[in-house]
Image: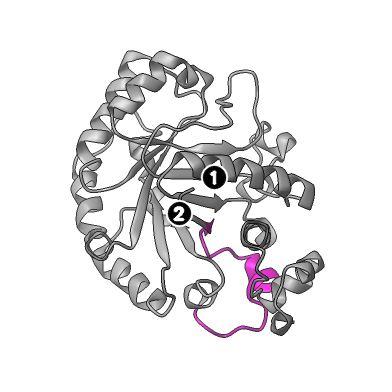
Amino acid sequence: MGPIAVGIAGWSYPDWKDTVYGNNREDALVYISRFVEAIEINSTFYRPPSAKVVEAWLRRTAPREGFFFTAKLHRDFTHAPEADPTLVEQFHAGFAPMLQTGRLRHLLAQFRHDFDDRPDHRRRLADLARDFGHAFDLVVELRHRSWQEAEALGFLEGLDVTVCNLDYPTGAQSFQMECCTVGRYGYFRLHGRNYAAWFSKAGRDETYNYYYNRQELGRIKTRIDRLAQAFERLTVITNNHYRGAEVANALELKYLLTGDRQPVPPALLKTYPALQEVSLPDSE
């Protein structure tokens, strides 16, 4: 079984002021990096990274041994008809400090639910693999069920990319593989199970407003164990960020996976009292 790291998506949300950070006056990234093993950078979905900002992220998380980042690829590569070619170089240059230090584990291309298996979409994936695959561990999040056909999976294997495993609300046309093993290093994202908001085009906060209960986490833990058997290492990212639920669930998962009690932010412990079952005594 490969090593398993559990992290969260993002760290800067207005509603976290009371639910996660509380009275803490420390820099938010410095603070939260003490509690999780990895953070998925969301801001690069909207704007390319700058080396100066990336270097600052590295400095702020340097005290946390073994901590790493993952990042989302710009939305123009996944949601627009075509992307500005200069974005490719901006991503390479901006993330160079992390690539040089080995602190960027994955680059995630998150596609729309209707991005199905057809020739022009295959060309787009092949272009991404060409432009990023040699420098980054490229992960593709594919939400359409056509990609789980054997021939499509064979195509993806040929690109030398990782296909993201997902826990999310699904419909008849959704990608629903429980254990997709395409890739060398596994990536598993948990979006929550707020079916009503997911399919109603609700706002971002409501879409990801979901807290996994202990029974659900137990089943997810079983799935994680299975995935870890298939990859050299596995990164698990919780993305149900509203009210800090992703942090709570990440800490609960880490406890289930290791049996070790976890340090918990005091404000989060007040928001989710059930965390007392997994928290170290000095977290209160």
Picture residue at 20% right of the left edge, 43% below the top: 134
Residue 158 image point, x, y percent:
28, 25
Q: Is residue 40 above or below residue 148?
A: below
Q: Residues within 10 Å of mark 2 (few under 14, many from 20)?
A: some
Q: Which residue is mark 2?
A: 42
Q: Amino acid at mark 2?
A: Asn
Element at label 1: strand
Residue 144 image point, x, y percent:
51, 23
Which residue occupies the foreground of this view, 281 or 104? Answer: 281
In the orientation shown, which residue stands out farthest toward the front? Answer: 1
Q: Which residue is mark 1?
A: 189
Residue 212 included in the magenta stretch of the image: no
The alpha-carbon separation of the residues under discs 1 and 2 comes to 13 Å
Which portion, as a residue range, is magenta?
Answer: 6-27
Residue 11 included in the magenta stretch of the image: yes
Residue 129: name its quadrant. top left
Picture residue at 20% right of the left edge, 34% below the top: 130
